[in-house]
Amino acid sequence: MKTWEINRAGYRVTDYWAKASGLKGRDLAIVAFEAVKEFNWISDYEIVKFDLAKPDIMFRVWDLMDCTPFRGKEKKTTSHYFRGIVSGFISKLADKRIVFIETKCIAKGDPYCEFRTERTL
């Protein structure tokens, strides 16, 4: 699966979840994080910053499925699948193209994976 396809998956699910839940913005993001917990993609999460207008968003996730197999074994961050889905999802929420970078990663020995907005396109 190509990176843009992963991003599109997150982008496309946003409308469905918004319609089904009647939520938007941060509240819809919380629903998404709760869903990925139920899928066992993460064990927990923390939204540190969430400003769609700037955009300035940072969140942390524990035991991310992309990175857990490499826990403490890598020199670089390893989440590309999850990062792509979140980038697409948040891009749709903000109505602008947003790219996230992973600043901390359990694969590098950090206690959690941390993502923040890098830029908008």
Image (spheres, rainbow, N blue to C red):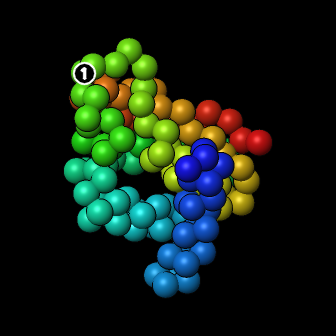
Q: Which residue was labeled with disc 1?
A: 72
Given residues 75 and 103, the one toward you in this image is 75
Q: Secondary structure at mark 1?
A: loop
Residue 42 point in image, percent of width and height: 28, 50
Quadrant of residue 114 within the rendered picture: top left
> Which residue is at the front of the view, 4 or 100?
4
Q: Residue sitting at 72 percent across and 41 percent down? A: 120
* Position above or below: 66 against 42: above
- In the depicted view, which residue is nearer to us: 79 or 91? 79
Q: Is residue 112 visible?
A: no
* Residue 51 placement (x, y as % from top left): 57, 49
Circle 1 packing at 10 Å, graded few (<14), some (14-19), many (20+), is: some
Residue at the right extreme, as displayed: 121
Compared to 73, does 38 lie above or below? below
Amino acid on which disc 1 is placed:
Gly
Q: Residue at x 61, y 68 (%)?
A: 12
